[in-house]
Amino acid sequence: MQNRNDRPRAKCFGYGRLSAAKPDLTAAVQEEQAKDYWQRQLKPAGIAWGGFFCDTDAQGSQLFADRKQGGEVFALAEPGDHVVVWQLDRAFRSAADGAAVIQALAARGVRFHSLDLPSEAADSLDGGIAVVMRAVGEIGRSFTSERTLIRVTLEPRA
């Protein structure tokens, strides 16, 4: 459907990634959350639903644009479009990748929304909040990994 200026109508693309560590976070759950956000926040503004894309076998460490579905969303998103994820960690596992993708999308006029951030923060994702959020997440995972390695090393062998 075209708008008044004969430009394609802006779309909202939902994105998710499955994780063995979070089996209850299914594609259906992530899609439902993204679609609900679209219906409440974006559809009333005339934004069309562009579909939900979910990587089912991608490693979290794999760059967003290198994943099959992440790359598809990245390629499809055009000026005026929106990309919605349920949680930042479903899209990115490194601050560098998150910052690069969000900034590249913003430079193309695409808005990125992460539903695990307060709505005020979502408006400034391309301004740096995503980098801070990812860095904090990476530090937390690093500490968890170190504690796990120390615990495994210190535990007596059977």
Image (tube, rainbow, N blue to C red):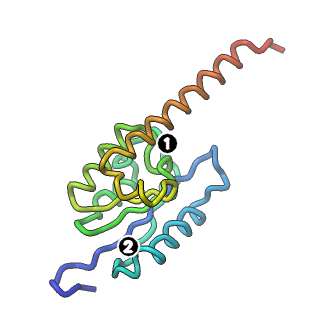
Position of the N terminus by quadrant:
bottom left
Which residue is at the far front? 120
* Residue drawn at (49%, 72%) of the image: 35
Q: Is residue 157 left or right of residue 1?
A: right
Instruction: Look at mark 2 in the image and give the residue it sits on.
Output: 50
Q: Is residue 148 left or right of residue 119?
A: right
Callout 1: SS? loop
Measured as percent of width and height from the top left, residue 89 is found at 50, 46
Against 7, residue 56 (above or below) is above
Measured as percent of width and height from the top left, residue 50 is found at 38, 73
Q: Is residue 14 left or right of residue 7?
A: right
Amino acid type assigned to the residue bearing label 1 in the image: Gln
| Disc number for residue 67 | none
Label 2 packing within 10 angstroms: few (<14), some (14-19), many (20+):
some
Camera-side residue of 12 and 130: 130
* Residue drawn at (41%, 59%) of the image: 113
Measured as percent of width and height from the top left, residue 28 is found at 59, 66
Amino acid type assigned to the residue bearing label 2 in the image: Gly
Instruction: Look at mark 1 in the image and give the residue it sits on.
Output: 59
Which residue is at the far left? 5
* Residue drawn at (24%, 65%) of the image: 78
* Residue drawn at (64%, 22%) of the image: 147
